[in-house]
Image: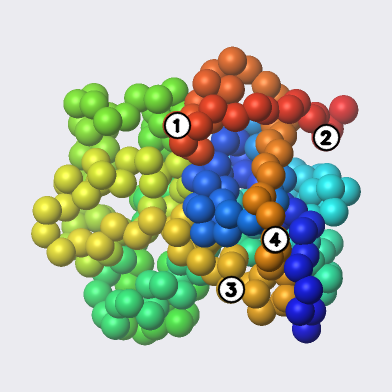
Amino acid sequence: MKSTSDSRPIGIFDSGIGGLTVASAIARAMPKENIVYFGDTAHLPYGDKSPAAIRAYSSGIFEFLKSKNCKAIVIACNTASALGANTVKKLAGKDIPVINVIDPTVNHVVQNFTSGKIGVIATKGTVNSRVYAKRIEKRSENLKVTMLATPLLVSMIEEGFFNNNISQAIIDSYLSKSNLKDINGLILGCTHFPLIKKEVEKFYPSKVQVIDSTEIVAHHTKNVLERHGLLNKTGKGSHHFFVSDLTPSFAESTEIFFGKKLRLEKRNLWV
């Protein structure tokens, strides 16, 4: 195991800019780490794309991040984690750790819930894959998982329409669905959704634990880097942000997801 400092960047990618919530959590957890982020804004949302398309997009983005000398890859998208992670892992081999947002969250649920019903709200792609249900129920026979596609929430958050009465009404409408009744915990199964965590918690004044994967993934990423001897131990991290398509709305929305306005550089990998 290496004992020296490794200043190579962490590569993070998402179908758009929602994964900036994960990048922000990683930056807070490891302020010395350099980050290269890629948002595939030309192809969002991934939730309604075919598995083959998502594997192709994920492969192209991995090659780009590899060209940036990234020491580890974080797939900051639930749909890409469900449908593209195995493809990325094969491309990365043993040299580059690949971290997805699903497995650390599954570990958290299994460790913190001994029995009961776990709800998941996510994109259609993630829900159709049943990835959370399969992985959690495989690990614990006492846990049952119910998943609900909530497609309106992503576009609502992308456009900045949350923290108001209209957004609360949309959120409440989804959470009122019968298959989310009597849950003990709710996984926010999209990296956009931490931004509406407070609104979700308003709907559940009782003992429903709302599970935000971003902090869980950041902590897990730090553990992986530490285990592989890949932590950067000196200086202050620098961050570079790339998108496959650039519009004023994306540029404006970066502050929503990362806490400050970011400079986005356009890089279309498919031309």
Residue at 65% x, 74% y is 226
Q: Position of residue 121 (x, y in %)?
A: 37, 50
Residue at 22% x, 49% y is 201
- Which residue in the protein does label 3 denote? 223
Q: CA distance from mark 4 to mark 3?
A: 18 Å
Q: CA distance from mark 4 to mark 1?
A: 29 Å
Residue 96 figure quarter: bottom right
Up-down relation of residue 176 to residue 263 (above or below): below
Chain-order first, disc 3 or disc 1? 3
Chain-order first, disc 4 or disc 1? 4
Residue 234 image label: 4
Q: CA distance from mark 3 to mark 2?
A: 31 Å
Up-down relation of residue 266 to residue 47 (above or below): above
- Which residue in the protein does label 1 denote? 256
Residue type indicated by callout 2: Leu
Chain-order first, disc 1 or disc 2? 1
Dot 4: what SS? loop
Look at the numbered discs 2 and 4 and tell me whether their residues touch, using CB distance below 8 Å: no
Residue at 73% x, 27% y is 265
